[in-house]
């Protein structure tokens, strides 16, 4: 009896444990990633930027809300929000409550597809199928016919009222408490083909202390354009770090055309003879219909920007 049923029962128990861990434990195991990026002019004092991304708030996610509020205790010099704040049209007040303490700091934001449209129930295996067929995340997709409108305007109005700079296919500036100025350029979400690089072409403004580029989904066309124009640092989200990863191997998909080696964390991107630093946040949430994570904990990132050698 043991020989016949022992292994299947063990595998069943192991599978159940993995499902429980990936749905109940890891999605609530919030982490802070810390990275250092040498992008400031020589001799300039370090700056600390807090990047939050892919909150995907669902009404009632109290632990996530408490954790986000606690990040204000880091006292960053400025905050960058790289989109997908919503996964529930009723959650706008809870997003604003969770981010409220962070909105006391200078900040900037771009939106992602899930800010504009409610998520749809889909088979998550389709990502693996599309990847195997060579169609995965090739160019992004226009919004589906009948997509549910999310009340993103309320987010925009509150962010703007707090002084955060909206960067949907436009440029902006942040002036920090220490007097430093940051020139910002952002794109609307390439994942739903709202990006218009022609509206911001021309490279970074050179009279600022630092130039940053922001985009929600790190599609190669956006990264190539930013790097070719000479931006020293690009910040993005969208990938969820792969969301379901294989231990000691990593991500299987990125949900865009970025390679899996750069699905999260700090890397570099080369285009037009220029090299940029690229930081992709694994984000701190997930689509409400696939609320799982495995070997990829939810995160925010504190980037310490230091002087170049």
Image: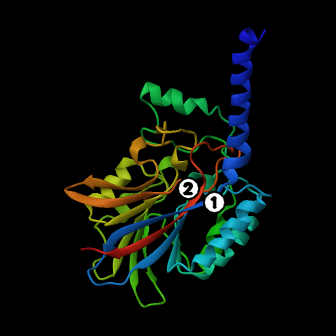
x, y percentage for residue 136? 46, 34
x, y percentage for residue 161? 62, 80
Is 90 in front, or is 29?
Answer: 29
Q: Badge 1 local density, few (<14 within 10 Å), some, or many (20+)?
A: many
- Horizontally, residue 200 falls left or right of residue 281, namely left
Q: Spatial distance from mark 1 to mark 2, Cα to Cα?
A: 8 Å
The image quadrant that residue 29 belongs to is bottom right
Look at the numbered disc 2 and give the secondary structure of its residue: loop
Is 272 in front, or is 48?
Answer: 48
- Horizontally, residue 34 falls left or right of residue 120, namely left
Q: Are marks 1 and 2 in contact (CB under 8 Å)?
A: yes
Q: Badge 2 local density, few (<14 within 10 Å), some, or many (20+)?
A: many
Q: Which quadrant: the N terminus?
A: top right
Q: Is residue 214 above or below residue 207?
A: above
Residue annotated with mark 1:
85
Q: Is residue 231 above or below residue 16?
A: below
Residue annotated with mark 2:
112
The image quadrant that residue 215 belongs to is bottom left
Q: Which mark is drawn over residue 265? A: none
Residue at 66 percent of width and 78 percent of height: 101
Q: Closer to the observer: label 1 or label 2?
A: 1
Residue at 75 percent of width and 65 percent of height: 94
Look at the numbered disc 1 and give the secondary structure of its residue: loop
x, y percentage for residue 143? 57, 45
As drawn, the residue found furthest toward the front would be: 2
How many numbered circles are shown?
2
x, y percentage for residue 175? 45, 85
């Amino acid at each position: 009896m043991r020989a016949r049923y022992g292994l299947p029962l063990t595998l069943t128990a192991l599978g159940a444990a993995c499902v429980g861990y990936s749905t109940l434990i890891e999605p609530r195991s919030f982490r802070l990633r810390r990275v250092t990026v040498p992008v400031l002019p020589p001799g300039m004092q370090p700056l600390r930027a807090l990047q939050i991304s892919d909150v995907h708030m669902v009404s009632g996610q109290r632990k996530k809300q408490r954790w986000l509020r606690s990040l204000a205790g880091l006292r960053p010099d400025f905050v960058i929000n790289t989109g997908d704040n919503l996964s529930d049209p009723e959650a706008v007040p809870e997003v604003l409550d969770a981010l409220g303490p962070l909105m006391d700091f200078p900040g900037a934001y771009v939106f992602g597809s899930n800010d504009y449209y409610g998520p749809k129930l889909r088979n998550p295996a389709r990502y693996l199928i599309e990847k195997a067929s060579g169609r995965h995340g090739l160019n992004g997709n226009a919004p589906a016919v009948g997509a549910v409108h999310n009340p993103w305007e309320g987010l925009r109005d509150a962010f703007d009222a707090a002084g955060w700079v909206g960067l949907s296919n436009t440029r902006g500036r942040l002036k920090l408490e220490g007097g430093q100025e940051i020139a910002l350029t952002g794109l609307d979400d390439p994942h739903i083909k709202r990006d218009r690089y022609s509206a911001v072409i021309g490279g970074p403004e050179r009279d600022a202390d630092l130039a940053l580029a922001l985009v929600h989904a790190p599609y190669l066309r956006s990264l190539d354009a930013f790097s070719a124009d000479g931006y020293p640092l690009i910040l993005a989200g969208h990938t969820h770090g792969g969301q379901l990863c294989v231990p000691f191997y990593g991500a299987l998909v990125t949900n865009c055309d970025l390679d899996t080696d750069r699905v999260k964390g700090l890397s570099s991107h080369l285009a037009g003879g220029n090299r940029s630093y690229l930081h992709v946040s694994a984000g701190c949430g997930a689509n409400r219909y696939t609320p799982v994570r495995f070997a990829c904990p939810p995160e925010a990132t504190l980037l310490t920007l230091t002087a170049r050698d």
